[in-house]
Amino acid sequence: MNFASIENIGKSFGERVLFKNISFGINEGQKIGFVAKNGTGKTSMLNIIAGGELPDEGQVIYRKNLKVSFLPQEPNLDPELTVEQTIFASDNEILKIINNYEHALQNPDDTEAYQKAFEQMDVHQAWDFETQYKQILFKLKLDILDRKVGMLSGGQKKRLALANILLSKPDLLFLDEPTNHLDLEMIEWLEAYFAKESLTLFMVTHDRYFLENVCNEIIELDHGQLYSYKGNYAYYLDQKEARITNEQIATDKAKQLYKKELDWMRRQPKARTTKSKSRIDDFFEIKSRAHKRRQDHQVQLEINMERLGSKILELHNVSKSFDNLVMLDKFEYVFKKGERIGIIGKNGTGKSTFLNMLTNGIQPDQGKIVVGETVKFGYYTQKGIEIKPQQKVIEVIREFGDYIPLKKGRQISAQQLLERFLFDRKKQYDFVEKLSGGERKRLYLCTVLIQNPNFLILDEPTNDLDIVTLNVLENFLLDFPGCLLVVSHDRYFMDKIVDHLFVFKGQGIIDDFPGNYTDYRIYESSKEPEKTTTEVTPKEKKNWKKESKPTLSYNEQKEYNKIERDLKKLERDKKEIEALFVDGNLDNDAINENSQKLQKIIASIEEKEMRWFELSEKLEE
């Protein structure tokens, strides 16, 4: 069944044509990944198809009564609503029934309202959906239901918008970088969710494993032409390579024919016959094919970096804590030449703190970090590049270096490095203020690389980079002969670049795993799962709610509900203070003040949990 037809659409900005005469269809059950370089019209194409932007020509036709949802990179949410109000503002009727049931639970004295809400849950079979709704909120870490949207971070807003769209159950879903602001655990959950759900998807994402495991078709916009591949990402790579090879063969043949026809053209008299005019027209078409060039950049470098000595980087008995939050606990490691280590772990487990300690940005509480005399760090942080007014791209990189030395006396200049990272000569003389977020990330990477480090530290280098740029960066890093330490949520990138992992598990626990990310996931899956909680089916949950109500008095029920709300708030306050310690920007007075606050919160949590367990035991009697 056809859901949407895209018919001969085109888009231009001034004299610059992004694309024209583009046509294709989206059918029920398709999960399409849309791939293109930054700056070639990818976002414009997505916005036009999703209905957020009009094409200069052509049209997009949707099937009647089709429910369509769009997740943009910057969601537009009402800042005055709370998280809970935003979720229940959806037009999903079952969500409204669940909302009424939740409110009835908060007012146990109104037995009539409770019974009515309970019956509605049964009639509309909302118990399963309630379980799914709570699972989505839990997986996306949206437990701050009473906080206003205006107080949320950019990542929390994106996750809230994603939860809203998933719960609205659209027929056709458009997604722009859905894995941004998600940690690895969230990404893998969302990947599994999309893979099993009967959804029709059209998405832009740079997460190649996401494309591989979710999509059944890849559409690529390349040099203004649209190419469709009926398969996942691996199939797309194989078929694209075959297409480029065939194009190159055709181009080589056209060059040979061009030379032959050029000789013929030069021998022609000025007065031409009708037959020769036809051949002349064919000549110009051949010439066009023969001069076709692909602008793909492939890095094959023999970098001549400064020599690393026998002593590189050593950590001896290193510990670091922020009050009760332990980052490292007597950590020991001696780096060897050519090591390529990936760092993974949940947010707040100390990954960035670890990198800052290695580069002397933060001092350990105990132990020592010894840096070899020959080590030259190149540190790419998440903060990005500081932009100076009226500064051009080429001027920025030349502040850090003019070239990277290669073996056999060769070198790669600042201009050539920028070209390899997709800044053509014209773009190099643009003002930095004009660059997009992804282009600024590319430029920042170039400023780090031009300094020719022999120990490269990269903190989330793949954020905001498109797939083409990621391939360029990966090729460069594969040629890099020094030590490499990388923090990234990009699983494909990690698999390709690193050969073992530091797994940050929290509270100072760091596992050294001898393999890449996929090896680690296979290893973890093979371990016997630990049963930490008893699963409750929706039916059991329903009966438990109904039967447990009379076992608590009215005041105890009110106290029980209040404790649950208080514990959520206290946990949230605890996380916020811990996050301040993780940032490492507090002075001594602020550290002391927040330490006292944290101790009070922890004591209050322990006290309320004890009372909650007492009341819970009564519920189970």
Image (cartoon, grey):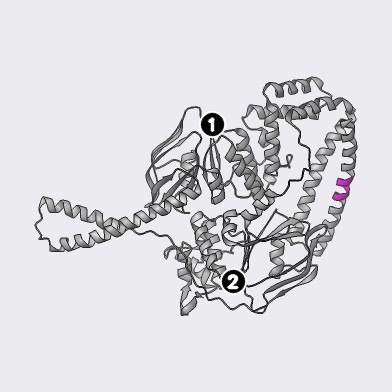
Q: Earlier in the sequence, mark 2 or mark 1?
A: 1
Q: Does residue 495 show up magenta in the picture?
A: no
Callout in the foreground (2, 1): 2
For the stretch drawn in magenta, the main secondary structure is helix
User: Residue 272 location, x and y as percent?
Assistant: 10, 55
273 lies above or below 533:
below
Task: Give the side of residue 368 with respect to residue 197, left or right.
Answer: right
**What amino acid is found at the position of numbered circle 2 in the picture?**
Gly
Crowd band around label 1 with a 10 angstrom C-alpha radius: few (<14), some (14–19), many (20+): some
Residue at x-position 84% and y-position 53%? 598
Range shown magenta: 601-606
**What amino acid is found at the position of numbered circle 1 in the picture?**
Lys
Kind of element beneath mark 1? loop
On the image, numbered disc 1 is attached to which residue?
A: 67
Residue at x-position 67% and y-position 33%? 88
User: Residue 285 location, x and y as percent?
Assistant: 25, 53
Task: Give the side of residue 621 with respect to residue 223, left or right.
Answer: right
The label shown at residue 482 is: 2
The quarter of the displayed image where residue 86 is located: top right
The residue lying toward the viewer, choosing from 267 and 80, is 267
- How far is mark 2 from mark 1, CA to CA? 52 Å
Residue at x-position 12% and y-position 60%? 268
394 lies above or below 540:
below
Task: Give the side of residue 227 with respect to residue 210, left or right.
Answer: left
Task: Give the side of residue 569 with respect to residue 286, left or right.
Answer: right
Residue at x-position 50% and y-position 48%? 233
The quarter of the rendered structure image containing the C terminus is top right
User: Residue 518 location, x and y as percent?
Assistant: 62, 54
Kind of element beneath mark 2? loop
